[in-house]
Image (cartoon, rainbow, N blue to C red):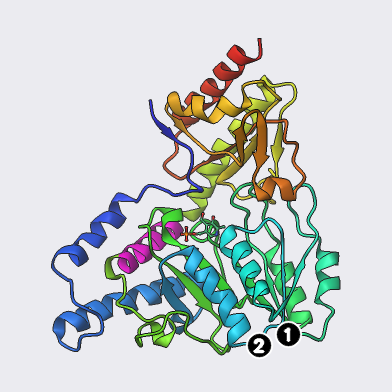
Amino acid sequence: MRVYLDNAATTPIAPEVAECMIPYLLNEFGNPSSTHSFGRQAKAVIETARRTVAKHLNCAPAEICFTSGGTEADNMALHISVNALGVKHIITSAIEHHAVGHTVEYINQQGNIRLSYVKIDSKGNVDLVDLERLLQTEEKTLVSLMHANNEIATLLPLEKVSALCQKYNAYFHSDTVQTMGHYAFDLQKTKIDFLTCAAHKFHGPKGIGFLYVNKLLKTEALIHGGAQERGLRGGTENLYGIAGLAKAMDLAYENITEHQEHVQALKTYMIDSFKAHFNDMSFHGEVSPEKSLYTVLNCSFPPTSKAGMLLFTLDLKGVACSGGSACSSGAVNMSHVLQGIGADGSRPNVRFSFSRYTSKEEIDYAIQQVKDVFNKTLV
Ligand SMILES: Cc1ncc(COP(=O)(O)O)c(C=O)c1O
């Protein structure tokens, strides 16, 4: 049996999405910038997709800029903030995805901004009192905090952070790569200046995503050389990717409550099964449905001498999952996220991540494989 439980890394493309992309790979291949009928047809596909995305976020189509994915969209948000909006102070956390973490470090090295890291607790929750303290400054400030952590699942209270940013007149960027397509967004209710998306995290194609930019903001191109995407991003558009992204979004939001309930039930079942089997079981990050992303579960298993072999053994048994630790010569090197929350490096950790296609049988198989590894190694 082969079981894929690494959906936070990427998800399988939905058959309906692949199908909807095929015409644009075969017959409807026009360049959207061409003025003839082939081009006009392609342009119409892109603008329809933009309206679809905007409908799901309750924003204006002009606020959506298609990108190559989450990393590019995060880079754009941060660079626009500094270069076009004159941001002089960025507040972020130590457990952001590298798409944000490494980019703010790079911008900081250029010497034009002040960088602050907000305090987080041992479950990855942002300390809102500390955030408010950091916001009390005259400098133009951007807050960049991810909606859900891709390793430990902890959710950010978006409304509270949005309200704080408005109170102190700061811009707000949230990396929503793990939550787009998994939670509903209403940008008329919650004011956020920048949101980011990668379609492959919700059964869309790889290499396509978008940046939402609040229309009231001044912007500046990151990629020069063409007038595409209203001058924000030059280059011939990824026509079939954009069509696939819109279809994936429609499918994700069509039955979102059903998907959420299905996946949450599998996650709860895995939590309960491991707790019942291991005396000393814990989890990294928040685990409750209210405070954690339902597609991700980061397990902290009891210490074992074979910790470094755990992922490898599961892979041999056909279970694909991932870990935030790399073990080299007996020493476990923890990811920046696990280090950031002060995780115990002596305990093996495994991130299981689920999708709407994950079945109970697959979860049962994975749980059994984990138990087998421990039964053999703990004696
Ligand atoms: C939270 C988060 N941000 C950004 C990214 C980057 O997305 P992409 O690889 O599509 O550029 C990822 C991908 O793992 C992610 O999980």
Residue 281 figure quarter: top right
Residue position for label 2: 86
Residue 251 painted magenta: yes
- Give the x, y percent position of residue 319: 46, 30
Can residue 7 be seen here? The reply is yes
Q: Is residue 109 magenta?
A: no
* Quadrant in the picture for the N terminus: top left
Q: Secondary structure at mark 1?
A: loop
Task: Write down the residue under mark 1.
Answer: 140
Around disc 1, counting alpha carbons within 10 Å, would you say few (fewer than 14), some (14 to 19), or many (20 or more)? some
Residue 374 vs residue 235: left or right?
A: right
Badge 2 element: loop
Residue at 74%, 21% in the rendered image: 279
Q: Is residue 274 left or right of residue 370?
A: right
Left or right: where 288 falls relative to 359: right
Circles 1 and 2 in contact, beta carbons < 8 Å: yes
Q: Does residue 152 lie above or below 274 as drawn?
A: below
Say which of 250 and 84 sits in front. 84
Q: Which residues are magenta?
A: 241-254
Looking at the picture, how far across and down is residue 155, in whole percent? 67, 55
Question: What's the amino acid at mark 1?
Answer: Lys
At a point 69% along the width and 37% down the height, the residue shown is: 283
